[in-house]
Image: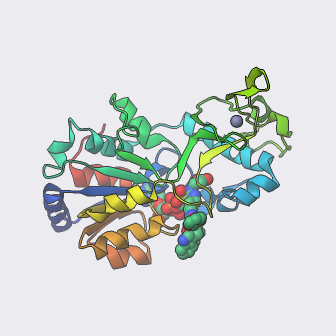
Amino acid sequence: MASISQSQLRSFKAALKEAKKPVALAGAGLSAASGIPTFRGAGGLWREHDALSLATPEAFSMDPSKVWQFYHYRRETCLRASPNSAHRCLAKLLSPSQRSKYLPSSGSLHLITQNVDGLSARAGTEIGEDHVTSGGILEMHGSLFRTVCTSCNDVRPNFESPISEGLRGTEDPSLEYRETPLEGLPRCENLTRWSRSIQPCRGLLRPGVVWFGESIPALDEIYEILEGCDLIMVLGTSSTVYPAAGFAGQVKMNGGRVAVFNLECGPQDRIHADWLFQGAVEELLPLALGIETQ
Ligand code: BV8
Ligand code: ZN
């Protein structure tokens, strides 16, 4: 069981009570306890490919079969997973009816997540609330459960399993890799006008995530939120991918305070953190916030 020094805990709880514009920034460590592999370490590899090398537009145009099998594998893993106590903790803070108990001085909490697994949103659904539509959760790198058509740009949610017949079974990493033909990959159902008839577009879909080299759609909104932030909780991220890796420093520069929750604390954390809670976020966050999540 991870431990926290009493003095750290007392001063952090006092800061929570005063916080007017608290923000939580999450990374893969938030979902580790739900069985979702992180990008660092062993989890960062899929079929001997470095996960980050597959998350690029170039990789998709070169080999859409491989990239789709990679995302199909992650979708199936996330569909079988469940939110953990850290996700549930944040869902209570995001809940308008429960927030005031834990954040008495703040009218809002924003969760900015780098995770595309949809587990934070599901923790909200579990308590009957939609924190994505309410703007409480910002999925800054998109979602595995959204598709974008590369022909007509249609964007829509997609929780189908498998997402296409051609990908059925390919999620089993023990199986030899076999290319999925293009027509077996996810195709667009958006009805479009062809001369006098209406037909499905059938364009090739891509996962609704932000790939390396692509800009963050909600970045302006995020900088607005960070502008007045007086307390940021940095949860299970290695702070190596930008622009997210610069957010804690931004808040610090604006006079806000930083609390880091991580199994191991990186160089950035040591520079910015006013509170360093070293350990499993699914244990330390409920403890630090005094929230029951069982
Ligand atoms: C852009 C979606 C520009 C897809 C992802 C400045 C300097 C250097 C480089 C750049 C720079 N600015 C931009 C770049 C380039 C690049 C970048 O940052 N590269 C890095 C590698 C150096 N950034 C980009 O390309 C961004 N776009 O800049 O566009 C632009 C501007 C205008 C016009 C055009 C373009 C886009 C970045 C987004 C890429 N997409 N994900 C997908 O998921 O497939 S990033 C992806 O990787 C994740 O979303 C996340 O952001 C990142 C992984 O980091 P973490 O989540 O932190 O995970 P990690 O495994 O690394 O760490 C886990 C941590 O948890 C560890 O610390 C561990 O100790 C801890 N932990 C584990 N278990 C637990 C725990 N902690 C607590 N409890 C536990 N139980
Ligand atoms: Zn289309």
For image coordinates 30% across by 62% down, the residue present is: 232
**Residue 280 in sight from this viewpoint:** no
Q: Nearer the viewer, residue 214 or 278?
A: 214
Query: Does residue 151 lie above or below 63 as drawn?
Result: above
Q: Is 117 situated left or right of 16 in this image?
A: right
Residue 41 x, y percent position in the rendering? 59, 63
**Residue 78, picture quadrant:** top right
Q: Is 244 situated left or right of 111 in this image?
A: right
Q: Nearer the viewer, residue 53 or 174?
A: 53
Q: Residue furthest front?
A: 196
Query: Does residue 167 lie above or below 177 as drawn?
Result: above
Query: Does residue 230 lie above or below 120 as drawn?
Result: below
The quadrant of the image that shows the N terminus is: bottom left
**Residue 65, picture quadrant:** top right
Residue 224 x, y percent position in the rendering? 34, 60
For image coordinates 38% across by 44% down, the residue present is: 87
Q: Residue furthest top?
A: 197
Residue 102 x, y percent position in the rendering? 18, 47
